[in-house]
Amino acid sequence: MVQNWPEDKRHKQVMRLLEAVGMLGHEHKRPDQVSGGQKQRVAVARALATNAKLVLADEPTANLDHDTAYRVIELMKKMRDELGTTFVFSTHDPKIMSEAEVIFTLEDGRLQQPSETAVAAHV
């Protein structure tokens, strides 16, 4: 149960998130009935369902097609703006990185300071 919400509120939230990640119409399918990319989309929706203040995600768009990945990023931005949610995620996709506010890199196992360009571009 999502935060002990009333059933109608839970249902609306679930449907809104499934639509946002392109999975509306698949809500009654079992995990073995959907593709890997579809499972990834459901995982993103589940992570966003509780309106958490912090979401940590490892490659949240890795198995998604380009359009769906951008829809997920736009949903994250909307939640950031409307709910104050902070997203911290790892990615190897430069197109997705270009949407980030601050970019940290790992080099030889060490966390590097964000580049001046990345911070300045998003301040």
Image (cartoon, grey):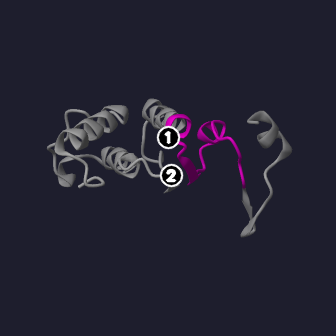
Type of the residue with mark 1: Leu
Task: Name the one closer to the observer, 54 or 72.
Answer: 54
Give the secondary structure at mark 1: helix
Q: Seen from this angle, which residue lies furthest right?
A: 116
Residue visible at 46% across and 35% down?
Answer: 75
Residue visible at 45% across and 52% down?
Answer: 52
Give the secondary structure at mark 2: loop
> Disc 2 marks which residue?
53
Where's the C terminus, which quadrant? top right
Residues rendered magenta in the picture: 80-104
Whole-percent x and y of residue 38? 31, 44
Lateral position of residue 53 relative to residue 15, left or right: right
Q: Are marks 1 and 2 in contact (CB under 8 Å)?
A: yes
Q: Which mark is residue 75?
A: none
Whole-percent x and y of residue 1? 23, 55
> Disc 1 marks which residue?
83
Lateral position of residue 53 relative to residue 1, left or right: right
Residue 88 part of the magenta-drawn span: yes
